[in-house]
Amino acid sequence: MDIIIFQNKEFKVREVQFPEVGNTLISTISLNESLMNEHGGYVSDEAITVDEKIFYFVNDDEMNLSDEDLINLITEELK
């Protein structure tokens, strides 16, 4: 698991390989919330860049799931 820093805060990020998509970055909903303002827009150009790198956002506790469980969770949510 790695860390991404945005607005001087650390957020978990990890790479997961999806069969159909390949290697993707997964991060936390708390990062996603930090990227957006109260009107649903990005807080900065840096926020856009960060968001474009992340394939999917999950709850903080879900970041600790195994790759297989995390892939299954995201696959189900995307249906």
Image: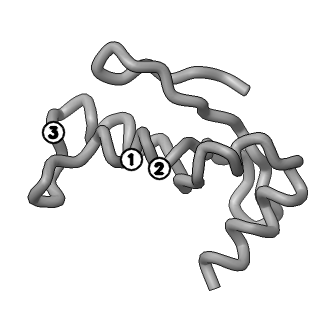
Question: Sequence-wise, which precedes: disc 3 or disc 2?
Answer: 2
Q: Amino acid at mark 1?
A: Asn
Compared across the picture, whether 30 is left or right of 76 comes to left
- Residue 50 x/y as whole percent: 38, 35
> What residue is drawn where x is 58% and y is 54%?
58
Secondary structure of the residue carrying tag 2 is helix
Neighbour tally class for label 2: few under 14, some 14-19, many 20 plus, Cα within 10 Å: some
> What residue is drawn where x is 13% and y is 53%?
38
Residue position marked by numbered label 2 in the rendering:
29
Residue position marked by numbered label 1 in the rendering:
32
- Residue 9 x/y as whole percent: 39, 19
Q: Are marks 1 and 2 in contact (CB under 8 Å)?
A: yes
Q: CA distance from mark 1 to mark 2?
A: 5 Å
Q: Are marks 3 and 2 in contact (CB under 8 Å)?
A: no
Neighbour tally class for label 3: few under 14, some 14-19, many 20 plus, Cα within 10 Å: some
Compared across the picture, whether 57 is left or right of 74 comes to left
Give 48 or 34, whichever is nearer the viewer: 34
> What residue is drawn where x is 53% and y is 53%?
57
Residue position marked by numbered label 3 in the rendering:
43
Q: Amino acid at mark 2?
A: Ile
